[in-house]
Amino acid sequence: MFLFDIDEDKSRQQADRLLKQYWRVKHIAGSASHLKSPTYNHAPKSSNNINNAENKTIQAIEARKTLENVEYTLEQLPDNYVRLLRMRYLNAEKLTVIYICMELSISEGTFRRHKKLALTEFAEAYPNGELLVYRE
């Protein structure tokens, strides 16, 4: 296997999966600010070794790192790919493909082609190769 023998389809799918979760990750990243101090009431309580506050804090930190990685990766891409990916995945409103095509002045076929290339480049540029899938 060569180091550069990347399965582009599977790597694109990884990028697509991550970007589709962008808003969920963004909400988790902001959830640490809602953590509350523990309260004690002297009532007996069953013991488990799970610290929910700690888990939420860890999730929020990981989510923030993911958001930083997404932004860093977008900075590495050509402007036309960044605009397409932002409109398709990172916009607070769910924009339709037709609307995006009109805004970018491209056909749906060009949109699909550019999206495919943009996702491939996104996967390749993502830190530590985390989105890349290699052929066996």
Image (cartoon, rainbow, N blue to C red):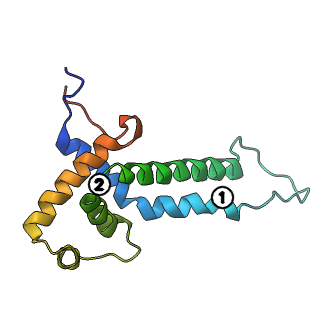
28 over 69 or under it: above or below: below
- Quadrant of the image containing the C terminus: top left
Q: Which residue is mark 1?
A: 32
Instruction: Tell me which corner region of the image, top left, top right, bottom left or bottom right, holds residue 35.
Output: bottom right
The dot on residue 136 is none
Q: Position of residue 47 (x, y in %)?
A: 76, 44
| Secondary-structure class at tag 2 | helix
| Residue type beneath disc 1 | Ala
Q: Position of residue 85 (x, y in %)?
A: 30, 62
102 over 52 or under it: above or below: below
Residue at image location 24% in from the left, 62% down from the top? 80
Instruction: Tell me which corner region of the image, top left, top right, bottom left or bottom right, holds residue 32.
Output: bottom right
Seen from this angle, which residue lies furthest top?
A: 1
Q: Position of residue 68 (x, y in %)?
A: 49, 51
Q: Which residue is mark 2?
A: 16
Residue at image location 69% in from the left, 65% down from the top? 34
- Quadrant of the image containing the N terminus: top left
| Residue type beneath disc 2 | Asp
Horizontally, residue 36 falls left or right of residue 41, namely: left
Seen from this angle, which residue lies furthest front?
A: 79
Q: Position of residue 55 (x, y in %)?
A: 64, 48
Residue at image location 23% in from the left, 47% down from the top? 120
41 over 124 or under it: above or below: below
Q: Residues within 10 Å of mark 2 (few under 14, many from 20)?
A: many
95 over 126 or under it: above or below: below
| Secondary-structure class at tag 1 | helix
Q: Residues within 10 Å of mark 1 (few under 14, many from 20)?
A: some
